[in-house]
Amino acid sequence: MAWIETVPPRDATGRLGRIYAQAIARAGKVFQILQIQSPNPAVLQGSMQLYTASMMGASPLSRAEREALATTVSRLNACHY
């Protein structure tokens, strides 16, 4: 099994600290799916931008439909996220 050393929220500074602060403001915590990307804050920020555009941007699908699709795909992939 692979091991990736992550930066916990209490140790995050600079760009990563700002990204984590946004995550806490949005969700009340920094989920592991974000922390796993902490070694490269630029990648984490890009990932969050993609998520935000996909789930909250203009779309013919409602937010509820997009969430339902994301949940279904995660379930099919046996992913608890």
Image (spheres, rainbow, N blue to C red):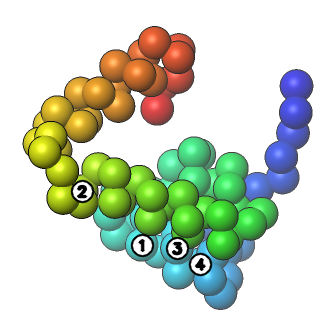
Counting the numbered discs, the total is 4
* Sequence order check, earlier mark of 1 and 2: 1
- Three-letter amino acid code at the position of disc 4: Gly
Figure quadrant of residue 73? top left
- Three-letter amino acid code at the position of disc 2: Met
- Give me the residue at 52% from left, 73% from top: 19
Task: Give whichever of 74, 22 is nearer the camera.
Answer: 74
Numbered badge on residue 17: 4
Tell me the CA gap for discs 4 and 3.
5 Å
- Give me the residue at 59% from left, 46% from top: 32
> What residue is shown with label 3?
19
As helix, strand or loop, the secondary structure at mark 2 comes to helix
Tell me the CA gap for discs 3 and 1.
5 Å
> What residue is shown with label 1?
22
Q: Residues within 10 Å of mark 1 (few under 14, many from 20)?
A: some
Q: Does 23 appear above or below 63?
A: below
Name the quadrant of the N terminus: top right
> What residue is shown with label 2?
56
